[in-house]
Image: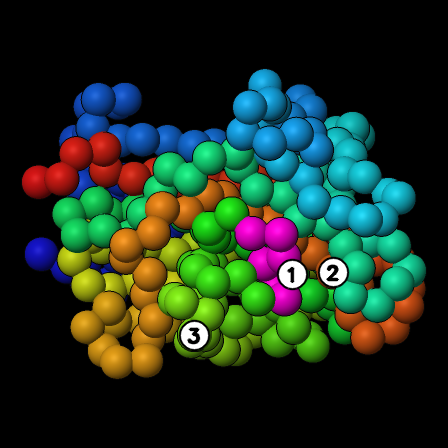
Amino acid sequence: MSVSLQHGCGIPVDFPGFQNARMPRDVVVFYDDFIAGSISTGDIASTWDYTLLTTQATLPALLDGTDGSEDEAGGILNLVTDATVGEGLSLQVNGEMFHLADGYPLYFETRVNVGDISNVNFFVGLAVTDVAIIAGVTDQIGFEMASDVLYAMATKDSNDKTINMNITEADDDWIRLAFFWDGVRYVHFSVDANDDGVFDYKGTLDADTSGHYIEQAMMMTPSIEVNTGATATAERMYVDYILVMQQRFSE
């Protein structure tokens, strides 16, 4: 049974597959609050959690939680791009462990902040392992910002489908992004543009509709990529956390 749109996002326990879940028997959870370093240039054999792909000099760092308003406390990943158009950082969790398959509901949520939205391109979500996500990953699901516009993005076999999230975001503002795969047919996308914990439903992709390009056969992994836009100026993106929850066993 598919989820009703009235559920929105932001409260994963309300979704089918997570109700009365016996943790961790029933649900697989990946959660990174970026409290400690977990990034390496190594591959899946590495003892680190992430593989980092970059040709630039500035590497990811973790911010100290010193902000009095607490909106930058509790672990923040700081990604700074070089002053080169199209150059940046790509991080993927080692191994591909999540999939949008029948019978396996999945919930994804993140919180991000971009210094200059007019000159930053980013993707955050799930993707197959690839050397460049924005430039042409074959399979993905998540959110992409390009030229000030935030989209929900689905890609299957290099074919893309986007939904404009229709939000106006200021520089240095926190937003929360979430999507839910109901385990049957639909992916619902929501945005908390005010960072107040209230998510607004923004659109749905339908696996049974031609041209919606929802990848259901490939395993994917939590992925983050940020690149400098059209102006050769160093930019930055913060990521507060990444959460992925998926039903462990098919009903």
Residue 151 in the figure: left or right of residue 64:
left
Residue count near mark 2 (Cα–Cα under 10 Å), binned few <14, some 14–19, many ≥20: many
* Residue at numbered disc 3: 159
Residue found at x 28% / y 57%: 216
Quadrant the N terminus occupies: bottom left
Magenta stretch in the rendered image: 130-135
Confirm whether residue 74 shows in the render.
no
Residue 68 at x, y = what percent? Answer: 77, 35
The answer for how far apart the CA atoms under marks 1 and 2 are is 6 Å
Q: Is residue 155 above or below residue 218?
A: below
Residue found at x 59% / y 19%: 47
- Residue type, numbered disc 3: Asn
- Residue type, numbered disc 1: Phe
Q: Which mark is residue 122?
A: 1
Q: Secondary structure at mark 3?
A: strand
Residue 151 in the figure: left or right of residue 72:
left
* Residue at numbered disc 2: 227
